[in-house]
Structures are given as structure tokens and as C-alpha cells.
Amino acid sequence: MTTTTATQWAVDPLHSEVQFKVKHLVISTVTGSFKKFQGGVTTQGDDFEGAEIHFSMDVNSIDTNQEGRDAHLKAADFFDAEQYPSITFESTSFTKVKGDLYKLVGNLTMKGVTKEITINAEYGGSAKDNYGNKKIGFEVTGIVNRKAFGLTYNALTEKGGLALGEDIKLIANIQLAQQA
């Protein structure tokens, strides 16, 4: 029987980014990001199939390039950062679909509500940095319905349409550093 050792990986925040996009007035898209986040991955050896993944974002680090909008997003109408300062994700499965494409399933907790989500991850490759540290890259994408997590605030336009889209596009470019 062969025993495979667990390998620990940590998110490198200097070489990673977490963004989101939402429709505004149905005619344009607003992009935002979380500036503070952390996470890690546990794999069996160098194989990412079946990896255990955990990730969290600091709600107070939200940035849409508009101070007033950011303050509103942190308020009770949206994320309620005072009561729920973090958005967390814990994987339940990470499976290879084909080639460099993976399906990531897990529990997302936002504003005190936990729901299972399925998102995509594309392996970008591995390399050693200038210090000899092994790095791995993934681009993670998916769509989350904000109303499912209690983010139901919306305003109506003068024609009676909704000002904000319900589906949030997630785009995260994550670089992982192998831990000693």
C-alpha cells in the first residue's frame, strides 16, 4: 500500500485577485473586488483532484472604486459587514472535468446564509519563483445568485425595472504557494 503525503498550499495574496461583476440598470456592468482575503488548499501530493479548499474574504475590504457605493455595500442593505465580517467557502469536492478544467463544489457562507455552489476552476500551470518556491495558478469563475444569500436589496428604475442584477459573476485569479 502506497501512502501519499498531504501537501499544503497557501493563497499568495500579492499575486492573486478576487473580483465580482453585477449588472446595473440592465445596461452596464459594475466591477468590484475584495482587497483582503486568505485561503489554503490541501492536496494528496501534487495532484489537485480531490483537493480540500478553504477561502475567506474580508467584507470590509470591498472596493468598487466608489466610496459611497462601498459604504452602502458594507451596510445592512447588502453584506452587513458589522454583523457578518467575512464571506467563507469550504469545498466538498474538486474534480477534473477534462484537461486543465475542474469543477469546484462547496459551501459558500455570506451574510449568515450557507448554500452549496458549483464553480469552475482552470489550472494555469506551475512554476518556481525567484526564491525556488513552487507556485500553482488557477482561474476560478462562476455565478452566484445574491438573493439566495439574503442580499435582496434593490431599487426600481423610473420604468419599473430593477436597478441591480441578481446574478453576481465571480472571477478569482489565485496563485498558491506550496508550504514547507
Image (cartoon, rainbow, N blue to C red):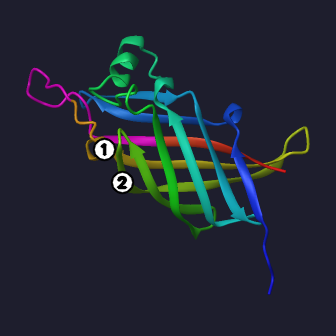
At 57% from the left edge and 51% from the top edge, which residue is drawn? 54
Expressed as whole percent of the image width and height from the top left, the position of residue 137 reads 69, 48
Expressed as whole percent of the image width and height from the top left, the position of residue 38 reads 61, 39
The Cα atoms of the two marked residues, 1 and 2, are separated by: 8 Å
Q: Give the residue number, with chain letter if any, for mark 1.
A: 149
Quadrant for residue 153, please give it: top left
The amino acid type of the residue labelled 1 equals: Phe
Callout 2: SS: strand
Contact between labelled residues 2 and 1, with CB atoms less than 8 Å apart: yes
Callout 1: SS: helix
The amino acid type of the residue labelled 2 equals: Lys
Q: Is residue 126 left or right of residue 88?
A: right
* Near-viewer residue (15 or 106): 106
In this view, the residue farthest toward the front is: 83
At 44% from the left edge and 55% from the top edge, which residue is drawn? 107
Mark 1 closeness class: few <14, some 14–19, many ≥20 residues within 10 Å: some
Which labelled disc corresponds to residue 115?
Answer: 2
The part of the chain drawn in magenta is 154-170
At 17% from the left edge and 25% from the top edge, which residue is drawn? 155
* Near-viewer residue (23 or 78): 78
Quadrant for residue 55, please give it: top right
